[in-house]
Amino acid sequence: MPPASSGASATHAAAPAPSSTDASPEADSRLTPGGPGYRRMSFALFLAGVATFALLYSTQALLPLVSADFGVSASTASWTVSAATGALALFVLPLSALSERFGRRTLMTVSLTVAVVVGLLVPFAPSIGALVALRAVQGAALAGLPASAMAFLAEEVRPKALVAAIGMFVAGNSIGGMSGRVITGWVAQAWGWRVAVGVVGVVAVLCALAFRALLPAPRHFTAGSLNPKALGRTIRSHLANPLLCRLYAIGALFMTVFGAVYTVIGYRLTEAPFSLPQGIIGSIFLVYLVGTVSSAAAGKLVARLGRRGALYLAVSTTAGGLLLSLSDSLAMVLLGLVLITAGFFAGHAVASSSVSRTATAGRAQASALYQSAYYLGSSAGGTLGAVAFHSGGWAGTVGLGLLAVLGVVSITVWGSHAARVQERHDRRGLVAAH
């Protein structure tokens, strides 16, 4: 299959000289598995991913308790998640521009510091409005992490190791999302949701300190300017790239499914026929471990199936999980969540790594646009998933997820067709030239 044959495949030719750099280790000082600094770098960004998702989704498993405490509906309580993800989506692009000027490591450190400070204030929110406002500030602060981390990896890691390196960062996301929800579930059952989110804040502080101590200094970063016109040209060039636009849409749609499912699942499991306590509901998020494995294995999936094949496998797994979750059997619901989680994290790792490899200039902006789309999908999924649940129950939320999955399939098929048409056009032009 040619490199561009997938709707989300990364064009290897667009990556910076992969054949020469990978074939001549002495000529390339970028990090590679087994080399000095790679393990420290991977673990540091893994911890950053843990802190990011633990903070960003700290209230998601607690929404039924937040609803009860403030006397609000599920759709209103869901804004404590959607405000954070929506603010992240809005601020990720401007903060990525700052990373071009001041450095990836500096911006990630500042962003994580502000986010953990706000995280320690969240438990003291006096009203639902104040809670939503604090969560929005926290999301805006976290916006400095995802795109900067992707750009850092694209600059500091050799091309052939990039999918695996980004997979480790995404694996940290899954661990953070899982641990935050499991911790909050059991702590909230004993001491309430406020103490639970406070504990997540303390865990994030420890992750932030370890991240700053472990992350090696960048060796391939070149500072750019904050010229708005240059930034606008870079953004326009990325948005004019059909492959990048398809990747942005795929990331948004995958996250719409994930945001909808995990925003609403707590409400479903507190109701009949399950009627589970908060601690057990929090423990169900242990299925995030499946996401850790599937995202870290994304590189192997791509090597075996190609990017198009890996995406189709991720989509099929997600859709199968959605359908299984319609059952009234708790075991089938859990199996459905496992499949949804595995499919989502695999698809996200493939799409995000494709963005980093496709963009040869303005990588931070390319990653930032992906992250904006991704977290807008999360925000939309959380809000629309809650509305769908309110109007149609869990079947309504599943229906929303299946529509998003169908969108991913349509975009990938369309991209494959466009690539074949372009290939035929190029072949005719080559024949005519001779």
Image (tube, rainbow, N blue to C red):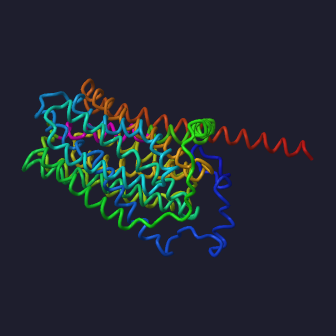
Question: What residue is shown at x 31% (from left), y 34% (from top)?
Answer: 83
Question: What residue is shown at x 44% (from left), y 52% (from top)?
Answer: 346
Left/right placement of residue 66 relative to residue 398 reads left
Left/right placement of residue 57 relative to residue 193 reads right
Q: Quadrant of residue 323?
A: top left
- Please state which of residues 274 and 28 is positioned toward the viewer in this rendering: 28
The residue lying furthest to the top in this view is 391
Establish if 76 lies above or below 8: above
**Figure label count:** 0
Left/right placement of residue 11 relative to residue 341 reads right
Can the viewer see residue 28? yes
Task: Pinpoint residue 298: horizontal percent, then vertical percent.
Answer: 48, 57
Task: Pinpoint residue 227: horizontal percent, then vertical percent.
Answer: 57, 40
Question: What residue is shown at x 42% (from left), y 61% (from top)?
Answer: 168
Task: Pinpoint residue 318: horizontal percent, then vertical percent.
Answer: 40, 45
Q: Quadrant of residue 43?
A: bottom left
User: Where does the magenta region start and end?
Assistant: 254-269
